[in-house]
Image: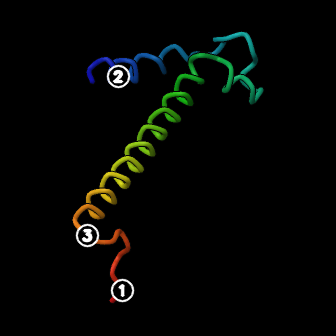
Amino acid sequence: MIMISLICHIVPVLAHPGHGTIPADNAVHYLIEPVHSFWIVLTLAVAGAATLMYYHHKRKRAAALSQNGKTSQPEAH
């Protein structure tokens, strides 16, 4: 956790004018340059992990409910 915090605070400092090989006015710059692409990859990784955890929990809960003889369908009120 400490390492993630340090990376989050140090990496933006590297993004000064003139960094990288592609001009900053080009959209590809934000996809290719490591200083920017790191955040894209990190965001996608966190979103992917959260999605996998959600579906794993949902599947595990459905299995537990079916073992108890209950349905996984919500009750209508």
Name the one closer to the observer, 48 or 35. 48
Left or right: where 5 falls relative to 18: left
Q: CA distance from mark 2 to mark 3?
A: 44 Å
Q: Nearer the viewer, residue 10 or 33?
A: 33
In the picture, the quarter occupied by the C terminus is bottom left
Residue 11 appears at what percent x and percent y? 46, 17
Q: Are marks 2 and 1 in contact (CB under 8 Å)?
A: no
The residue positioned 42% from the left and 50% from the top of the image is: 55
Instruction: Report helix, strand or loop for mark 2.
Output: helix
At x 59%, y 24%, the residue is 37
Comparing labels 2 and 3, the label whose residue is closer to the camera: 3
On the image, the x and y values in percent for residue 67 come to 26, 61
In the displayed structure, 65 sits above or below 7; it is: below
- Sort mark 2 into few (<14), some (14-19) or many (20+) by Cα contacts within 10 Å: few
Q: Are marks 3 and 1 in contact (CB under 8 Å)?
A: no
Q: Which residue sits at x=27%, y=24%?
A: 1
Relative to 38, say whether 40 is above or below: below
Q: Using the image, tell me which numbered label, if any, was put on residue 4.
A: 2
Q: Position of residue 52 (x, y in %)?
A: 43, 42
Residue at label 3? 69
Image mark for residue 76: 1
Q: Quadrant of residue 72?
A: bottom left
Counting residues from the start of the chain, the first of labels 2 and 3 encountered is 2
